[in-house]
Every structure is written in C-alpha cells, then in structure tokens.
Image (spheres, grey):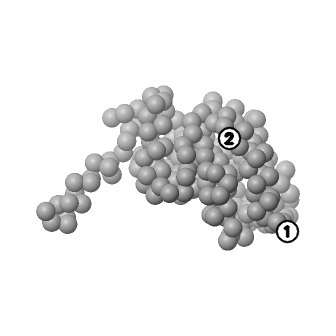
C-alpha cells in the first residue's frame, strides 16, 4: 500500500463528528490544554474557535498580565464576564476561557444555560510541568510559584467539578487524542452535538 493510499484510509477521522448545537466552553486550570485542545476541537467540528483571554487582550490592546498589573484582578474578571456573554451570543463554536472564569457563579450559570462546559481535568504534576517555564501567568508571579499553583488547584478543583462534562487530561494523550475524548463526552449530549 502506498503512503498516499495509507493516509487516505484515515480521512474519515478528518470529517466533523457531528453538528454542534451549543457552544462548547473549555474550562479548567492554567496549563490544562484548554486553548490547544479547544482549537483542535473547533477544527474537527468545523466551527469557530474563540478565546476569551485573546478577545480581552484585543479589546484592551494589552496583555492579560498587563491588565492585572494596571487594573487588578477584579476589573479583569468583570471584563471577562462581559466578553464570555458576548461570545456565547455568537454562532456556536468552541470557547476557551481563562482558568478563573468558571469560578464566578454567574459565569457558570450563563455557560450552562447558553452552552456546555467541559472541564479538562489535569492533575497538579501535569499542570506544573506545563506552566513552570512560562512567565505569562500573573497569578504565579510569586516567590514560590509551585506552592501557589497547588493552592489555586486545591481551591478550584471542587468548582471545576461542577462543569457539565469532564475529560481527563493526563499529559500522555496527544492533542488529537484529547479531541477524541472530548467528542466522546459531547456525543453523550444530543442537545449539544447532533450526530450526522
């Protein structure tokens, strides 16, 4: 079998897995893979990919760390809620949110009413391996970022567990494998993903 014939046998996996009826909102800790998996999921489902942090940065013409430094976290969270509400009103797609977005009860309620939340559930070791070399996380700009991440993790996990659906992000799966996992859980909700 030639390389071309062999690769063409994989084409069905490139077709969309169904018709999206509600926006899928990726939630979870920093480093869980919300953006990478969300972008690949949107490509698989042939829908727009949206990122609430990127939208906030575009509107403010500043990075998230700059907004935190200049205006504080509470100002950022207020803008974040407004942006998520606006994005949920657009055409169905996949929306990646910042790690703190799901903490606000009003955001959780809005996401569940107008979309579906999917928690990428990664353990602390996986998260630390992914974020420890990055300086783009304003909440980790402390004297002991690993301990800070642990505190944030323990405080947030019970809230992320309230998401409509969850998928384990174990650090071993490829992005495409993670997309497969998300599609499988979405398929359990015909009100979200209608099979072709």
**What's the residue at 20%, 66% (across, down)?**
3
Quadrant of the image occupied by residue 31: bottom right
Q: Position of residue 96 (x, y in %)?
A: 60, 50
Q: Position of residue 95 (x, y in %)?
A: 58, 47
- Of circles 2 and 1, the one toward us is 1
Q: Residue furthest left?
A: 1
Q: Quadrant of the C terminus?
A: top left
Q: Is residue 16 above or below residue 58?
A: above
User: In this orientation, which residue lies closer to the viewer: 80 or 38?
Assistant: 38
Q: Does 100 sit left or right of 5 as displayed?
A: right
For the image, the number of numbered tags is 2
Q: Position of residue 166 (x, y in %)?
A: 57, 39
Q: Secondary structure at mark 2?
A: helix
Q: Which residue is mark 1?
A: 143
Q: Position of residue 94 (x, y in %)?
A: 53, 46
Q: Which residue is mark 2?
A: 160
Residue 79 appears in the rendering: no
- How much space separates mark 2 and mark 1, taking CA atoms? 26 Å
The local crowd at label 2, few if under 14, some if 14 to 19, many if 20 or more residues have their Cα within 10 Å, is many
Quadrant of the image occupied by residue 16: top left
Q: Is residue 44 above or below residue 67?
A: above
Q: Secondary structure at mark 1?
A: loop
**What's the residue at 80%, 58% (across, down)?**
148
């Amino acid at each position: 079998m030639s390389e071309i014939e062999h690769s063409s046998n994989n084409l069905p996996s490139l077709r969309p897995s169904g018709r999206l009826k509600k926006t899928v909102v990726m939630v979870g800790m920093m480093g869980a893979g919300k953006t990478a998996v969300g972008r690949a999921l949107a490509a698989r489902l042939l829908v727009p990919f949206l990122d609430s942090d990127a939208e906030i940065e575009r509107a403010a013409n500043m990075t998230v760390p700059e907004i935190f430094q200049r205006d504080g976290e509470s100002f950022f969270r207020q803008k974040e809620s407004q942006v998520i509400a606006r994005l949920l009103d657009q055409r169905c797609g996949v929306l990646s949110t910042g790690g703190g977005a799901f903490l606000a009860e009003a955001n959780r309620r809005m996401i569940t009413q107008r979309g579906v939340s999917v928690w990428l559930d990664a353990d602390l070791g996986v998260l630390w391996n992914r974020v420890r070399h990055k300086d783009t996380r304003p909440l980790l700009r402390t004297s002991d970022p690993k301990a800070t991440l642990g505190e944030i993790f323990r405080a947030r996990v019970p809230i992320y567990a309230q998401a409509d659906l969850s998928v384990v992000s174990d650090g071993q799966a490829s992005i495409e494998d993670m997309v497969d996992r998300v599609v499988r859980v979405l398929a359990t909700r015909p009100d979200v993903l209608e099979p072709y």
